[in-house]
Amino acid sequence: MEPLSHMEKETIAEVGNISLGAAASALSAILNRRVYITTPRLEMRAVNQVKESYPVPCLLVEVKYLSGLQGSNILLIKQEDALVIAGLMLGSSPEQQSLGEMELSAIQEAMNQMMGYMATAMSEMFGQVVEISPPELTICDLADEELNFLDESSPVVELAFTIQVEDFIDSKLIQVIPYDFAKKMTEFLLSGGEVPLEESLPKALSVEKAVEEPVEEPVEEAAALPQADAQEPSTASRYPAAFNEAEPGSEPEVNSWEKLELVRGIPLEVTVILGKTRVPLGELLALNRGGIIALNQAADNPVEIQINNKPVARGEIVLVDEQLGVRITEHLTGL
């Protein structure tokens, strides 16, 4: 197996740096928090090495390219970090220990937006439209997970980023790219676009045979990516993550309606509290069919409406097509 050259490593690190920087911009807008992501550390590793070094319960995000690029790659996010992101989006309790249906819906929406930003950045980088399918999320222990789209006998390119979300997250984000996919991207960029991206490697061809085809060594001027200044060398450290740096203590400027659009599709749990009471265990055990439990709420008093266990409004019970409903009569402060 021919290792990636220094220039190829610089190029693929640059692709990851710019695309994940754009994804960080989307996350910053969704959370309305400062998000910082470092330039990546690149390593060529065996699939088993990646799985063994990241065995903690994690969220595996698979991204498939539909046009412009052909291939797949994955992002690995610690489950605890995904919980924090979901909690910031939903306002849920920080003590939440697992990703439920609602948290997964929030993370799915966040990933949709982040990968959309990433695809846009890559479209600009490659000079052609890059389209992706909706990211597929899997909660797993990576050591036990079969990564079907990766050839476990071939190495992969691992890009390790440090991601920080103010005081909430300071962790590691991993991007894993199949060797042949990474090779194809670098060939396209370093050849000035002369090697077609859509010309994928034959499936029956091993990676070892594929890299035997001679690749013309690019001249120094071709080393820069399309948007880079031709007079400066192309290095991953030249490009900070693509989001605005805010002054310490300040919040990023996000249009509230734009932020609402980002999370509009997330389902929220609405609960209507008719009343509460405390009953001795003996009385509960003595209850039979037809028994009545008196609540601490008068029949004509407004009921409490909660979203994600947080009181947001009061209302009155009504009938809607022979089903119970609630008419909002009062918004609580802070809604």
Image: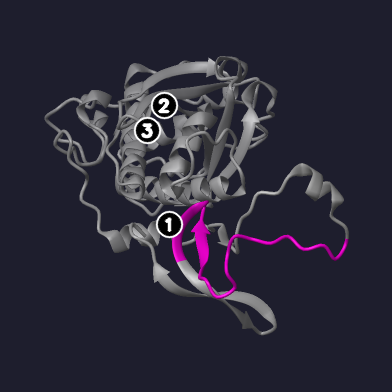
In this picture, which residue range is highlighted in magenta? Answer: 289-313
Q: Circle 1 is placed at which residue position? A: 263
Q: In the picture provided, is 192 more to the left or to the right than 310? A: left
**Residue closer to the observer: 81 or 196:** 81
Image quadrant assignment for residue 6: top left
Q: Earlier in the sequence, mark 1 or mark 3?
A: 3
Q: Residue 72: x, y in percent?
A: 54, 39
Q: Circle 2 is placed at which residue position? A: 215
Seen at 55% across and 75% down, the residue is: 300
Q: Residue 248: x, y in percent?
A: 16, 33
- Would you call the spot at circle 2 few (<14 residues within 10 Å), some (14-19), or many (20 or more)? few
Instruction: Tell me the SS state at disc 1.
Output: helix
Q: Earlier in the sequence, mark 2 or mark 3?
A: 3
Quadrant holding the N terminus = top right
Query: Which circle marks residue 16 in the picture?
Result: 3
Instruction: Assign the magenta stretch its main secondary structure.
Output: loop
